[in-house]
Image (spheres, helix red, strand yellow):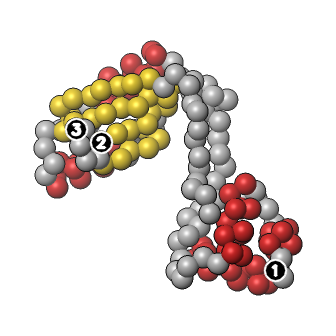
Amino acid sequence: MAELDTIDAAMLRVLQQHGRISNAELAERVGLSPSACSRRLDILEKSGVISGYHARLSHKALDYKMMVIVHISLSGQFAKTLTEFEAAVKLCPNVLVCYLMSGEYDYILRVAAKDLEDYERIHRDWLSALPHVVKINSSFALREIIDRPNVGV
């Protein structure tokens, strides 16, 4: 994908706020004809700049009131160890984000739980059962300050 021009950037800004906007409305907001807007949108999608369209759900409204940051250390960082851990962690429905890290811990996870009892269940049934885990350190988020779904364009 070539560099984004000002029209592409404008389209992305609008789509981040209004993902369900019609092509005609998007075209009007960025000053293009509907056909030109559609062509540009297709290029942005095919090039991977736009990776999908999603409904942003409220964890609190769905009764997931706790966010837990979990640091995990594995027994080693061999390819097989990492592959087995990553395949298993993808199966845990409460894990929202998982990053392979440099530094003290091998992985950092963001986990949604309904309450402390629910997190205890997740810890016992899922996290502790993940392959090659030797250490789990959990931190409980007290308050969310910012949660951007995207970077600015």
Please, is residue 71 above or below residue 148 in the view? Answer: above
The residue located at (64%, 41%) in the rendering is 57
Pick out the residue farthest to the top: 117
Q: Is residue 42 left or right of residue 36?
A: left
Q: Quadrant of the C terminus?
A: bottom right
Horizontal and vertical percent position of residue 54 = 63, 54
From the image, tell me which residue sits under label 3: 104
Q: Secondary structure at mark 1?
A: loop
First of labels 1, 3 by sequence position: 1
From the image, tell me which residue sits under label 2: 107
- The three-letter code of the residue at mark 2 reads Tyr
Q: Is residue 84 left or right of residue 94?
A: left
Name the one closer to the observer, 151 or 67. 151
Q: What crowding class fits label 1: few (fewer than 14 Cα within 10 Å), some (14-19), or many (20 or more)?
A: some
Q: Is residue 3 visible?
A: yes
Q: Is residue 2 left or right of residue 140?
A: right
Task: Report the disc number at residue 32.
Answer: 1
Query: Are the two marked residues, 1 and 2, in contact with CB atoms closer than 8 angstroms?
Result: no
The residue located at (64%, 78%) in the rendering is 5
Task: State which mark lies toward you, 2 or 3.
Answer: 3
Horizontal and vertical percent position of residue 119 = 43, 22
Q: Is residue 58 left or right of residue 136?
A: right
The span from disc 1 to disc 2 (Cα, nearest Å) is 44 Å
